[in-house]
Amino acid sequence: MQELKRNRVLDILKGLTIILVVFGHSIQYGSGYYYFTNEIYFDNPLFKIIYSFHMPLFALISGYLFYYSLKKYDLKELIKNKITTLFIPIFTSSLIYFLISKFILHVDISLVKSFLSFLWFLWAILFSSIIISIVNKKFNDNKFIYLFGFLFIFILPDFAGLNNIKFIYIYFFIGYIINKLCLLEKLQLGGGQVLLLSLILFNILILFYNRDAYIYGNGFSIININSQKIAINFYQLAIGLYRIIMGLVGSLLTLSLVKAVMGKLHSKILKALSYLGQNTLGIYIIQSFFMELAIPYICHDLKNINYLICILITILIIGISLLLIQIIKKNSLANRLILGGRK
């Protein structure tokens, strides 16, 4: 089989990653009320592996691809594009999520919380792209600004979802720099050395992955303010650095693995993964509705995790998402509001 073009390789990676996103959510939301409310999924070994790198990998790919947009458009066009493709779908979907939660499911949730928590990853990508656009266009990618921004991540308090945004920004920025400096081309990712090294490192690092390593309940801020005394939390600093390295190693392992085996996979499998990769935005949005608003109620009475059920949920939700994407695309207004499509 001939070497796949780079854009298709990235689509395949995105397709694989969105499967991991949905499967991870199926473990979280589809294993019963007790399993979900007591957050037992955080201790699940497979859940740990998936969550150690799947969102970092998504962010790396997003930052890598954003480099091409920066070369093509000016600042005004970039921001306009992100409002169309990200902000409008976030706004529309979050509003729908709030209305369903509040008035149909009678969940005690505020409009502000709905907008901040639902589709948090898209918020993070939106802010990351705007920040890098401004630094690139107005300050010519000033290294000191980027360095200050990295240090600021560990100093700025984690509130209103900023921990998630800071987490994704790091990988988005790294992905952008990798493309700008052509670093990906210098790595022989299809060879065995990088694959073996990343596999060894990943297996070592994952041994230390605990609940503090998840970004959702533990952010980046290393500043503690108690009784008017300011102190640095060095444990938090170590967790933050470990989390960054864990995500990078896991992403490198996945990329190396895909490059190593894609020539041996059947073309239909590659085509299916590539198709999923081209529809990740729609799948991510639609599956979020099902996972948060439907699956917990359907699987309420389950007593523990059942991987077969999780696999079935994953297949079902992805299939429904793809079907709904095709239906939505047929209506130009719905396509713009929900999927960020253009006229």
Image: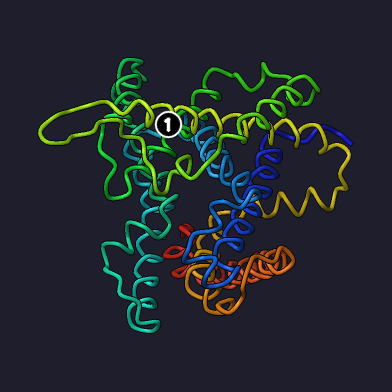
Q: Position of residue 141 (x, y in %)?
A: 37, 20
Q: Position of residue 136 (x, y in %)?
A: 36, 25
Towards the viewer: 69 or 19: 19
User: Which part of the image, by quadrant, shows the N terminus?
Assistant: top right
Q: How is the image coloured?
A: rainbow
Q: Position of residue 336 (x, y in %)?
A: 44, 63
Is residue 179 toward the left or the right of residue 273 in the image? left
Q: Which residue: 54% across, 17% down?
A: 181
**Res 178 quadrant in image:** top right
Q: Is residue 211 above or below residue 200?
A: below
Report crowding for label 1: few under 14, some 14 to 19, many 20 or more residues within 10 A (C-alpha): many
The residue carrying mark 1 is 240
**Res 254 quadrant in image:** top right
**Res 11 quadrant in image:** top right
Q: Look at label 1 and name its amino acid.
A: Gly
Is residue 116 toward the left or the right of residue 57 in the image? left
Q: Is residue 233 above or below residue 145?
A: below
Q: How many marks?
A: 1
Q: Secondary structure at mark 1?
A: helix
